[in-house]
Image (cartoon, rainbow, N blue to C red):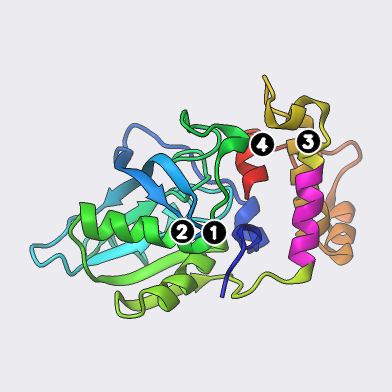
């Protein structure tokens, strides 16, 4: 069972490093369910909480064709867009897809967008808190008391597993893609190095930065993409394919605020 916020970043690294698509005008609009103060399992409270989501397809009269999609660390509701649509795995001709944003991803209430508890004032949260926020969205806001499936990759897969533990009768199926049921020591070590990369950037200023600590965030991504997501054999094969003076192996991350990454 997942007990610490460290578990937020146990990764399916390939999905983590695959960019989530940007939202376009032709796609379903962002929606926000405001719940007010949201009490966490720890007893702390996220004030003025709202969970961000989009929907695809049509909910039937019996409200029996819903699928919940939960996202990966660093991702958003676009994480598995390639699986959503008519005739695809998450077939919008048959199902009503509720694609959610996780606490801390910068769309749902997060350290970067909270006005009541900005940055390092934001309370620590865990996977079970994400699951509870999603349950409230479905039950209290959308009136959905049962779903056909809960689907998610990487950290989303961890949320899927927790759904199976916390709400075992709520769904017909669990689709957990590259999840971890428990965070291994290797992942904890990688994440600790990642957090230090951000926090040791002089621009971090103890979390009270005036501009994002981009050097630290780029180093964070380098740690993941260069060291954690590739083997020496992969590097050897890649270097043999690259022409002299070729492009860098990975670009720095700049989309999410450093405090969202740090509070995880």
**Residues at marks 3 and 4 touching, judged by CB atoms closer than 8 Å:** yes
Query: In this orientation, does residue 108 appear?
Result: no
Residue 130 falls left or right of residue 147: right
The crowd level at tag 3 (other Cα within 10 Å; few <14, some 14-19, many 20+) is: many
Query: Taking 260 as reference, is 206 above or below it?
Result: above
**Label 2, label 4: how far apart the Cα atoms are:** 21 Å
**Residues at marks 3 and 2 touching, judged by CB atoms closer than 8 Å:** no
**Residue, x 38% and y 68% (percent of image)?**
150
| Residue placed under numbered mark 3 in the picture | 216
| Residue placed under numbered mark 1 in the picture | 126
Q: Residue furthest front?
A: 43
**Label 3, label 4: how far apart the Cα atoms are:** 8 Å
Label 3 vs label 2, nearer the camera? 2
Q: Residue furthest top?
A: 210
The span shown in magenta is: 186-196
- Please tell me which of labels 3 and 2 falls first in the chain: 2
């Amino acid at each position: 069972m997942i007990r610490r916020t460290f578990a937020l970043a146990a990764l399916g690294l390939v999905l983590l490093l695959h960019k989530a698509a940007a939202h376009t005008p032709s796609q379903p609009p962002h929606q926000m369910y405001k719940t007010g103060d949201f009490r966490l399992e720890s007893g702390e409270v996220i004030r003025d909480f709202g969970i961000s989501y989009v929907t695809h397809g049509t909910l039937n009269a019996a409200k029996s064709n819903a699928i919940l999609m939960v996202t990966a660390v660093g991702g958003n509701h676009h994480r598995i867009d390639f699986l959503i649509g008519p005739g695809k795995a998450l077939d919008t001709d048959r199902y009503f897809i509720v694609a959610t944003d996780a606490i801390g991803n910068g769309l749902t209430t997060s350290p970067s967008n909270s006005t009541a508890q900005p940055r390092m004032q934001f309370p620590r949260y865990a996977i079970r808190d994400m699951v509870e926020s999603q349950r409230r969205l479905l039950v209290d806001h959308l009136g959905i008391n049962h779903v056909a499936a809960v689907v998610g990759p990487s950290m989303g897969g961890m949320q899927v597993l927790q759904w199976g533990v916390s709400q075992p009768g709520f769904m017909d199926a669990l689709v957990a893609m590259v999840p971890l049921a428990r965070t291994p020591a290797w992942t904890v070590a990688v994440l600790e190095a990642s957090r230090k990369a951000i926090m040791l950037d002089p621009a971090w200023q103890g979390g009270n930065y005036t501009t994002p600590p981009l050097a630290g965030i780029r180093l964070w991504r380098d740690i993941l993409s260069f060291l954690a997501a590739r083997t020496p054999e992969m590097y050897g094969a890649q270097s043999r394919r690259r022409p002299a003076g070729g492009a860098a192996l990975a670009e720095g991350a700049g989309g999410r605020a450093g405090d969202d990454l740090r509070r995880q």
